Image (cartoon, rainbow, N blue to C red):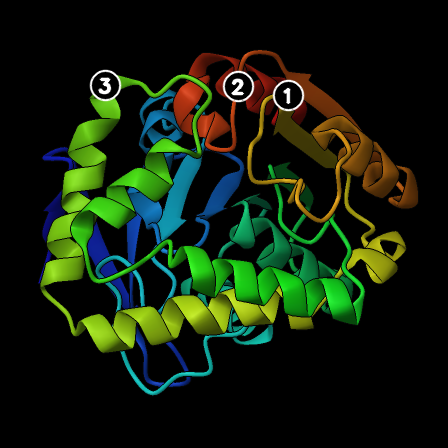
Amino acid sequence: MIHTAHKQFAIHHAVLSNGCNMAYIDEGSGEHTLVFVHGLATYGGSWKYQIEALKEHYRCIAVDLPGNGYSDRGNYDYSIHFYAGCVYDFIQKLGLKNVVLVGHSMGGQVVLHLLENVHDAAEKLILCAPAGFETFTPLESTMYKSTISTLDMFSTEENSLRQSIRTSFFQYPKQIDEMVEELVQIMRSHSTRSYRQMVDACVNSMLDEPVFDNLDLVEQPTLVLFGERDALIPNRWIHPVTTQHIAEKAVHKMQYAKLEMIAQCGHFLQLEKPHIVNAAIRKFVG
């Protein structure tokens, strides 16, 4: 069965080794294959502007991680390790070559975990506002989890989902409303309880499965992009420092990484400043 996302991209499915039916967008062609991995509680459609612009030059594949988008729900682990395994299995299933992994937020932590453990899983790496660069002590981790549950960002109320996405932008673009409504429709079509369990498991896993200490193991040329006005990284209640400070500290640990900060831009940089992000990707991948 093929759905359509944003009335423009067909949704395909691949059955992974764990039995999960994983949805993905697959557009364009070229020497390199860009594999886009979304952040917490979103989906492959969050890369729509990258796919539209870059499919002329590359094969562009954007996955829906299990428990998200049009992929299967199930009694899955929903951890960073689990998702990294799913992405690697997906690459193997499709026989993808010349892979460039592109991860946003939690998806950035997922692809970092993958490359720290499977060193030849991709040729290059692009990180957009990645989770995992900010480190937490056990006490800070406990504090973070309690603030998430107190705020209840992803509550049963659809307005909470809308609001949490809005606050991820520095200046919210009106055209994002269509994507938000699609996410709301997806949320309505599944059990609220399982959705919240998935989100809770993901948040806990981001804190419990750090990648910072092993950043030096990433051997790929890496492009790191952050919005200067990112309101989510760092958590300023716990770490009252700038986003750039967090980014520079992590990039310094990596062998072949370069950092680009984007002015007047929040956490969803690929949606807020797509032209800048797309140009940076083109220049980096070649």
Q: Quadrant of the N terminus?
A: bottom left
Number of residues whose C-alpha sits closer than 10 Å to that of mark 2, classed few (under 14), some (14–19) or many (20 or more): many
Residue 142 or residue 222, whichever sits in front: 142
Instruction: Please tell me in which quadrant of the rendered image residue 248 appears.
Output: top right
Give the Cα separation between the discs numbered 1 and 3: 21 Å
* Residue 83: numbered disc: none
The residue where tag 3 is placed is 174
The residue where tag 1 is placed is 228
From where the camera sits, is residue 267 visible? yes
Instruction: Please tell me in which quadrant of the rendered image residue 85 appears.
Output: bottom right
SS at mark 1?
Answer: loop
Q: In this view, does 82 lie to the left or right of 152?
A: right
Specify the amino acid type for callout 2: Cys
SS at mark 3?
Answer: helix
Tell me where residue 135 appears, x and y as whole percent.
77, 55
Label 2 vs 3, first from the N-terminus: 3
Discs 2, 1 touching: Cβ within 8 Å: yes
Label 2 vs 1, first from the N-terminus: 1
Compared with 232, 260 (above or below) is above
The residue where tag 2 is placed is 265
Specify the amino acid type for callout 3: Lys
Specify the amino acid type for callout 1: Glu
SS at mark 2?
Answer: loop
